[in-house]
Image (tube, rainbow, N blue to C red):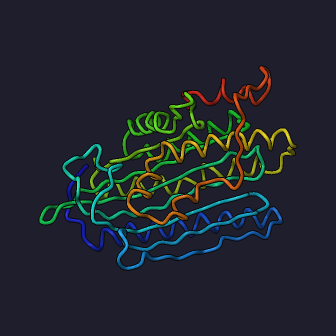
Amino acid sequence: MAEINLDGDHEQAVSGYLQGLQASITQALERVEAQAGGSARFLTDAWEKAAGEKLQGQGITRIMEGGAVFERAGVGFSQVRGPQLPPSATQHRPELAGAPFSAMGVSLVFHPRNPWVPTVHMNVRMISAGHAGKPAAFWFGGGMDLTPFYPFEEDAVHFHQTCHAAVAPYGPDLYPRFKKWCDEYFYLKHRDEQRGIGGIFFDDFSELGFEGGFAMLQSVGDAFLKAYLPIVERRKDVTYGERERDFQLYRRGRYVEFNLVWDRGTHFGLQSGGRTESILLSMPPLASWSYQRQDPEGTREAALLREFLVRRDWL
């Protein structure tokens, strides 16, 4: 965590990049939908927190539902400020307890219709905080991770290679660190299960200074479509039936469990008085639960747990 006298130019640069990233990603998904013959498009919901609310600021939530390729896809941008950091953000920095803060970021989750296409999550953000009369502490966070239902080795390798390429210019140690961090973070402790095949994740990151950290953040954000869209193109037209759909909904239940029980971003948003609809845009449109489900050995469903939802070196 570093200190800097952040000014309007710093914040404007980050905000401008994030809004452009949101626009480029939603446009790319609409092209995928159009090419598949779908008519679904993103709805844009611009919002602003009312005067007197705990949190102040504004954002743009873009949501697409009922698509031919994407059953639900949400991309949210927010830029907010509050009177004090919530507990989820000060557990590792007690000196900032009670400090006013500002936060901005883009967060997305895509839930494809076809079970052969994996769910994906990406987030990039910057937070700054500080007590009056002192330089603001700032840090970057984010990353991306892939959650397949019917996994393919080549997809996992491609996703991790793209993540590696995004951070490699900023230090040879970053991918191994961020990959390990992702594996440890996106882990359902109550199930002893990985959420997916991982990717990269970082938080409280300021060791490269503002310019270096912001450059790395942009590299991660710009790598997202390169990491994900080739997988979508390979899998979106594969035939599936009731069995695959049933397994997809069952595994989506695990996704819901993680986001509500363990995700720091969800907790941060709810604890700080954020906009609930935007915070929960990551939820799938449908999910299911089964009591002590066990899939037969030798099936692709059983292979997911045994071969892919484990911590592996995908490079």
The vertical placement of 300 against 13, above or below, is above
The percent coordinates of residue 210 (x first, y second) are 29, 58
Q: Residue at x 48, y 42 (%)?
A: 262
The vertical placement of 167 against 192, above or below, is below
Q: Residue at x 69, y 56 (%)?
A: 285
**Image side of residue 163 versus residue 207, left or right:** right
The vertical placement of 42 against 303, above or below, is below
**Image side of residue 177 versus residue 119, left or right:** left
Residue ranking furthest to the bottom: 51
Quadrant of image for the C terminus: top right
The vertical placement of 65 against 294, above or below, is below
The percent coordinates of residue 64 (x first, y second) are 68, 66
The percent coordinates of residue 125 (x first, y second) are 41, 58
Query: Which of 199 and 40 lies nearest the eye of the viewer?
Result: 40
The percent coordinates of residue 305 (x first, y second) are 66, 27
The mark tally for this picture is 0
